[in-house]
Amino acid sequence: MDPNLATDTDLIHRARRGDESAFSILYQQHRRSVFQFAWRLTGSQTAAEDITQECFLALLDGAAYDPAFGRLRTYLFGIVRHRAMRRVRAAERESAELPEAPAATDTLGAMLASERASMIERAIASLPDAQREALIFFEYEGLSMEEIAQLTGSETGAIKARLFRARESLRRKLAPLMADTAAREIA
């Protein structure tokens, strides 16, 4: 079956009736973005894999998608957001997950790139939840401010303010990194 001929709603209905090819089409179309978003929210590959599975199971179990309210991708992000936030709250109550040990690298450039990436990840992770979420939705997932507002139940103006505050906070936190990078380029 040509996936371009079936709407997401048709595919969902067919998948719920046991049509494996319909489910496969939905899964192939959305799994990568769902996983990436879950990973960015949780910082854990294992949690992101679990959330991705839970997201598609929720869709099959009858989660109420209505195309009148937006794209399926945005709806799936809502499921991911809910499940990721629930996991983060549970993890905070229990105990912090130990970070994975970085793989050994044999070049200075790779080490510096890894350290920069870690600094950026830590800076993003340190943002307040609402700011981090808006930044991830907008910068990494490519959602419009209107879609983010709809997904989070906020006003568009609030999303703009969150993005502005997130970017300003990152600018301040990453200023030393930017100064070090500029100094290396000049040398």
Image (spheres, helix red, strand yellow):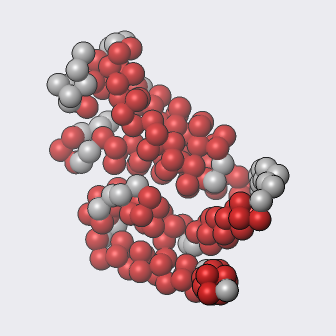
Name the spot of residue 121 as percent of width and height, x first.
63, 65
Name the spot of residue 61 as percent of width and height, x first.
42, 26
The residue depicted at 81 percent of the width and 55 percent of the height is 106
In the displayed structure, would residue 145 be above or below residue 61?
Answer: below
Name the spot of residue 173 as percent of width and height, x first.
62, 82
The residue depicted at 49 percent of the width and 84 percent of the height is 168
Q: Determine whether, in the image, residue 139 is placed left or right of residue 144.
A: right
Q: Quadrant of residue 19?
A: top left
Name the spot of residue 41 as percent of width and height, x first.
55, 55
- Is any part of residue 180 visible from this angle? yes
Q: Quadrant of residue 156?
A: bottom left
In the displayed structure, would residue 182 be above or below residue 141?
Answer: below
- Is any part of residue 10 visible from this angle? no
Instruction: Report the quarter where the C terminus lies.
Output: bottom right
In the displayed structure, would residue 106 be above or below residue 51?
Answer: below
The residue depicted at 17 percent of the width and 25 percent of the height is 5
Q: Nearer the viewer, residue 12 or 153?
A: 12
Numbered label tally: 0
Q: Determine whether, in the image, residue 155 is placed left or right of residue 168.
A: left
Q: Determine whether, in the image, residue 70 is placed left or right of residue 128.
A: left
Q: Determine whether, in the image, residue 111 is placed left or right of residue 74.
A: right
Instruction: Report the quarter where the N terminus lies.
Output: top left
In the displayed structure, would residue 148 be above or below residue 15?
Answer: below
Q: Nearer the viewer, residue 108 or 34?
A: 108
The residue depicted at 34 percent of the width and 24 percent of the height is 25
